[in-house]
């Protein structure tokens, strides 16, 4: 039965792929896309928020300066202009000067014409927010010295040093472009509860906890788009409700993704009416030992923890029940900066020889005087994939004689322990990012990073990362990245990665033009989607 | 009577303040920081200065006594403030959900009354016959099956039956439309949770009706009525049932109040944007003001419902003389 299901699903995917490439379907205009969202909207301000609960319903109202190509979001190096014109600029002056030409004739939904001043005001809010104004991702733009507009349709980003992480960071899906007029007249918090963008859809209504609706922006700057007349983002916190919504055709798609079981259920119930797209996901669960609490201040103990984990076997079995699959290091597995398998198996805990790894783990524990160590694992009360991976880890550690008590806490308590009180032995943590930007993404492993909760200092790691941040060429970046990865995961074993998440999106086959991205935050403006009904 | 009503009204004040006190301080004992969650979200780094500023803006750095006084004043003026997460007025957020929750509660109560009174009466009148056994089995099943489980079964049945009948799978709508705007759409969404919760609710009321009626049917005045040759139907309907309904009314009243905020899981199963769902969301995001507001509304519904139940007692049983 399972095989039959898979043939059916793969058939649907193949059919979809064929239809795109060979038949080159002509997009149809019209229709309303209903989709379900599993999280709530804290505010509408993209510069402040970090949740997909906001980005899925609100991103269609806004434009970005540049974006991940929605027709090819799987390629981590394919960016395109959104409000800028022509190609994404290459850096001048040794990669420290980026000049963006801005489209002319673009209007905000309230009729205000867009100029370079709006882009500058928005980016200054993101990178250099005034005191008291939150900006969730300003740390991504440490290299930016200034953002200026020499004329009405040119924006210049001046960097203090060249960095490979700059351009990907510019395609951040949360970097909504606001009207300078709104910022000046209403203040920097106005966008938390108000919407005025230049995106493909115009805001109509938000009924908190229920839905958000938008209608087609007739003056959208990407010619011929959007194809849809409108969309309705329906809030459905429970996964079973989201699955049933697709099954009953109350919604066509859920953009975050479902576990394998729900994919199989939908394919089983709907056959070729369902198409499935799958992708590696720029999200990984980590094991964070508390270095300030013995014996986790001992690198031998930390290394033993990672050596005990059978990642290759885990990938095979866990991928059948959870949204994890790919074995990788600290960099998103499909990126050119990621370790190849040959490089990966050299790192502690990634060897194909599990018995040898576990023997080494036992030896290290014995040497450290920690045989039969008992500790608690702080985990988050979210099934997919936290609890599944946590339970798997407990078993893995049991194989080397450790006794682990997994404490599964509701999110507020989990965060409180991890981020605030620091009262844990070992905790699950996560590194989920939007645009694949390895140099920025791996800053999570930096001891000085505000979101590294392992409680330690290490000048050597800081120095290596600093070199990585300033590396000018790809080759140089790759060599330093390996050095950094080996230091973090092996030599010092400061933290450990488990398995990379795996994104599975089953959706109604009449939804066309949507391509799966390696992040649930990307390509959500919906201008490329059309309905074949 | 009026003195009693006045006393009951006065007693509501300390009850509400006591509840407010418990809610306020229990919430503060909960681990978790709303600012940390709000700004940190899904892994963003937030520096301490921003968290401090957020706490200042939300008034969380004020002394607890000041915060509590604000809260109590808010209850008195029916202004619960704004949500710590969304910044919207709590009365607005609750108002959006209250309508839906109230409709489900009313519909479930109607379903429960329509099932429980006739079945409970039948069961008592035909005690220890096959009718009684069937009714008792149905009632016990209703108590044993959680309403959310019944809800899941209903949804699965709807999918299967609709596919068998029409070839397409049908599920109830996901978004609420008021009944006066589109009654068919509204009912096609809310009838299922009303049936799921109404059945469980009716199970308790059926058993209560049965046992209460059995007790009343053994009273001297019922025997007297029979001895006088009164028709059994009149004895049951006019004399016995009215008195037997006293405890049933209490159960229905308490259950109705419970339904206003207690349908947490059922609301999630049917994706209803009701007060129960909002309560869960506000608790998990440590939104103190929202949680306090919702719990206080539920407390008020309980207190007011109990007040009306007490008044109804006097109407149903003339022997009760409160004055």
Image (cartoon, helix red, strand yellow):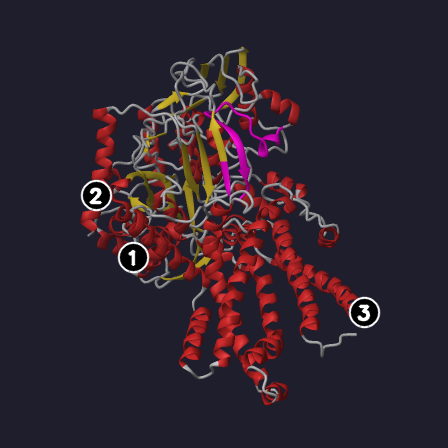
Looking at the rendered structure, the number of numbered marks drawn on it comes to 3
Label 3 and label 2 in one chain: no
Give the residue at mark 2: A8
User: Element type at marker 1?
Assistant: helix
Give the residue at mark 3: B3
Give the residue at mark 1: A363
Asked whether A292 or A98 is in front, the reply is A98
Residue bounds of the magenta highlight: A188-212
**Mark 3 → mark 1, Cα distance in angstroms:** 82 Å
Q: Mark 1 falls within which chain?
A: A
Q: Mark 3 falls within which chain?
A: B
Position of A295 relative to A73 (above/below): below
**Mark 1 → mark 2, Cα distance in angstroms:** 49 Å
> How far from the left and from the top, in percent, is residue B139?
46, 72
The image quadrant of residue B54 is top right
- Report the mark closest to the observer, 3 or 2: 3
> How far from the left and from the top, in percent, is residue B104?
53, 55
The image quadrant of residue B106 is bottom right
Q: Say left or right for A55 vs B164.
A: right
- Report the mark closest to the observer, 3 or 1: 3
Asked whether B133 or A334 is in front, the reply is B133
């Amino acid at each position: 039965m399972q095989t039959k299901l898979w043939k059916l699903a793969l058939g649907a995917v193949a059919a979809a792929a064929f239809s795109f490439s060979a038949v080159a379907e002509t997009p149809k205009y019209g229709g309303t896309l209903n989709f379900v969202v599993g999280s709530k909207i804290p505010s509408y301000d993209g510069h402040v928020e970090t949740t997909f609960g906001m980005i899925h319903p609100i991103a269609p109202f806004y434009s970005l300066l540049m974006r991940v190509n929605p027709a090819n979001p799987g390629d981590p190096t394919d960016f395109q202009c959104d409000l800028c014109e022509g190609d994404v600029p290459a850096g001048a002056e040794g990669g420290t000067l980026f000049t963006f030409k801005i489209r002319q004739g673009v209007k905000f939904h309230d009729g205000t014409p867009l100029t370079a001043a709006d882009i500058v005001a928005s980016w200054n809010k993101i990178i250099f927010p005034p005191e008291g104004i939150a900006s969730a991702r300003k740390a991504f733009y440490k290299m930016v010295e200034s953002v200026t507009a020499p004329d009405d349709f040119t924006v210049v980003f001046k960097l203090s040093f060249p960095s490979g992480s700059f351009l990907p960071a510019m395609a951040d899906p949360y970097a909504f472009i606001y009207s300078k007029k709104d910022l000046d007249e209403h203040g920097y918090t106005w966008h938390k509860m108000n919407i005025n963008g230049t995106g493909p859809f115009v805001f109509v209504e938000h009924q908190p906890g229920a839905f958000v609706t938008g209608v087609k922006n007739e003056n959208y700057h990407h010619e011929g788009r959007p194809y849809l007349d409108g969309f309705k983002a329906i809030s459905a916190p429970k996964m079973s409700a989201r699955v049933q919504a697709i099954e009953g055709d109350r919604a066509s798609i859920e953009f975050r993704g479902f576990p394998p079981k729900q994919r199989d259920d939908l394919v089983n119930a709907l056959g070729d009416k369902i198409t499935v797209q799958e992708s590696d996901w720029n999200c990984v669960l980590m094991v964070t030992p508390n270095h300030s609490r013995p014996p986790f201040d001992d690198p031998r103990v930390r290394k033993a923890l990672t050596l005990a984990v059978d990642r290759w076997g885990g990938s095979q079995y866990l991928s059948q029940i959870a949204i994890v699959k790919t074995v990788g290091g600290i960099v998103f597995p499909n990126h050119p900066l990621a370790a190849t398998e040959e490089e990966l198996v050299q790192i502690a805990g990634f060897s194909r020889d599990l018995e040898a790894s576990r023997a080494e783990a036992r030896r290290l524990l014995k040497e450290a005087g920690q045989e039969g160590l008992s500790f608690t694992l702080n985990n988050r009360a979210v099934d997919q994939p936290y609890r599944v991976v946590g339970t798997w880890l407990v078993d893995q550690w049991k194989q080397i004689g450790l006794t682990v008590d997994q404490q599964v806490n509701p999110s507020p308590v989990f965060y409180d322990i991890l981020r605030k009180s620091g009262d844990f032995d070992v905790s699950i943590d996560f590194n989920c990012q939007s645009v694949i930007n390895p140099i920025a993404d791996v800053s999570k492993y930096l001891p000085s990073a505000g979101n590294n909760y392992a409680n330690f200092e290490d000048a050597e790691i800081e120095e290596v990362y600093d070199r990585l941040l300033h590396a000018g060429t790809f080759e140089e970046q790759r060599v330093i990245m390996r050095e950094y990865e080996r230091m973090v995961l092996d030599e010092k074993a400061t933290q450990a990665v488990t398995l990379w998440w795996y994104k599975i999106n089953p959706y109604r086959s009449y939804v066309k033009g949507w391509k799966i991205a390696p992040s649930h935050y990307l390509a959500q403006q919906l201008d490329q989607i059309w309905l074949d009904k | 009577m009026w003195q009693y009503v006045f006393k009951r009204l006065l007693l509501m004040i300390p009850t509400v303040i006591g509840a407010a006190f418990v809610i306020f301080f229990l919430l503060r004992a909960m681990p978790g920081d709303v600012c940390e969650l709000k700004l940190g979200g899904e892994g963003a780094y937030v520096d301490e200065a921003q968290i401090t500023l957020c706490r200042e803006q939300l008034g969380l750095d004020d002394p607890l006594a000041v915060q509590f006084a604000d809260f109590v004043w808010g209850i008195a003026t029916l202004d619960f403030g704004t949500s710590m997460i969304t910044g919207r007025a709590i009365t607005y957020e609750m108002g959006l959900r209250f309508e839906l929750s109230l409709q489900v509660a009313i519909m479930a109560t109607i379903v429960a009354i329509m099932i429980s009174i006739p079945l409970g009466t039948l069961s008592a009148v035909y005690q220890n016959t096959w009718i009684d056994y069937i009714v008792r089995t149905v009632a016990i099943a209703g108590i044993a099956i959680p309403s959310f489980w019944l809800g899941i079964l209903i949804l699965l049945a709807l999918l299967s039956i609709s596919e068998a009948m029409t070839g397409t799978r049908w599920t109830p709508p996901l978004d609420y439309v008021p009944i006066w705007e589109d009654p068919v759409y509204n009912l096609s969404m809310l009838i299922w949770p009303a049936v799921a919760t109404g059945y469980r609710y009716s199970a308790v009321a059926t058993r209560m009706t049965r046992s209460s009626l059995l007790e009343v049917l053994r009273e001297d005045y019922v025997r007297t009525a029979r001895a006088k040759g009164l028709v059994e139907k009149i004895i049951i309907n006019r004399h016995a049932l009215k008195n037997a309904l006293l405890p049933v009314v209490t159960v229905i009243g308490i259950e109705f109040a419970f339904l206003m905020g207690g349908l947490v899981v059922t609301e999630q199963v049917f994706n209803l944007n009701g007060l129960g769902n909002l309560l869960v969301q506000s608790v998990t995001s440590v939104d103190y003001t929202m949680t306090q507001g919702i719990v206080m509304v539920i407390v008020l519904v309980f207190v007011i419902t109990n007040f009306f139940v007490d008044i109804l007692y006097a109407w149903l049983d003339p022997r009760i003389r409160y004055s």
